[in-house]
Amino acid sequence: MKYKLLILDVDGVLVKNKDASISSKVIDAVQAIKNKVKITLCTGRTKIDTQRIIDSLGISNNYHVIESGAKVLAPNGTYEYEKLLSSNDISTIYLMSKNTIANIAVCSQGNWIDYHEGEQYEEVTTVSLHSHNQDQTRKILLAVKDLEQTYHIAVGSHWQIPEGNFILITNREASKKHGIEYIQNKSTISKEETIAIGDMPNDLPLFEASGLKIAMGNADKELKKQADFITKNIDDAGVAYAIDTYLV
């Protein structure tokens, strides 16, 4: 099988936190294959936060999935796929979770801002419920369980608190799987021709759209169970090792 598309999560895969740099070994590995394989980022980050990573890897001529699958960023910088949440959606999510969360933020017009009850927000793609530890994560997920049939709910890594999580709630048609399938259709690339590398449960939908599923060595144990291959951890340039194993 000749793979044509490599999908990379960002946090926990390419960088350890919001402001960290990508290792030179990973950058070199990407540079070695970027003219042979399409390389797409698939992340909960906004366009502003993702652009630095895109520029570091030199992959601005590709499609990228941002804001947890709510938007697909085209090579020309426009959004080709966009799924939003209404004011009623946001209020419902807040009311069901407010007694369990450490904090709540919304991604509005491409910017993450703290949510305040009663305020109006425009063009919201994601509600992020913050936990400081795994016990709190479980309580939040239990509180919003009844929303699973109406929205897409995913658990991501916390940028500042390794023991905590971002519980990301988006439109039902906004997931990493939806975003990748849109790109596959645009590029006439099949699931079987796609490799995905992830680290957290919110990458499970990404795995669903991929023929070869690779988990980082530092990945969540549930994601590792679904992986076809477990690469090295982020400190050992796991992305570069995966590229060397399957794409060189």
Image (cartoon, rainbow, N blue to C red):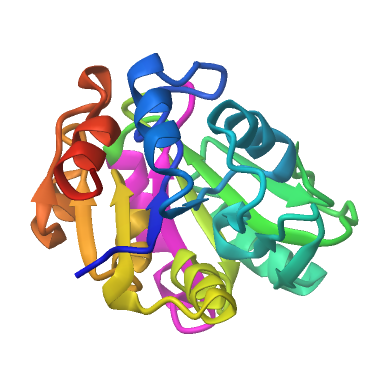
Vertical comparison of 117 with 233: above or below? below
Apparent side of residue 199 relative to residue 226 in the rendered image (left or right): right
Q: Nearer the viewer, residue 23 or 143?
A: 23
- Quarter of the picture containing the N terminus is bottom left
Q: Is 22 within the magenta?
A: no
- Quarter of the picture containing the C terminus is top left
- Observer able to see residue 84: no
Q: How many marks?
A: 0
Q: Nearer the viewer, residue 166 or 97?
A: 166
Vertical comparison of 104 with 207: above or below? above
Vertical comparison of 56 with 227: above or below? above
Q: Is 140 within the magenta?
A: yes
Residue located 89% across and 59% down the image: 122
Place residue 123 in its image quadrant.
Answer: bottom right
Q: Nearer the viewer, residue 75 or 113?
A: 75
Place residue 154 in its image quadrant.
Answer: bottom left
Give the x, y percent position of residue 214. Answer: 20, 51
Highlighted range, magenta: 135-161
Apparent side of residue 192 relative to residue 74 in the rendered image (left or right): left
Residue located 29% across and 63% down the image: 3
Give the x, y percent position of residue 132. Answer: 41, 30
Residue located 60% across and 37% down the image: 54
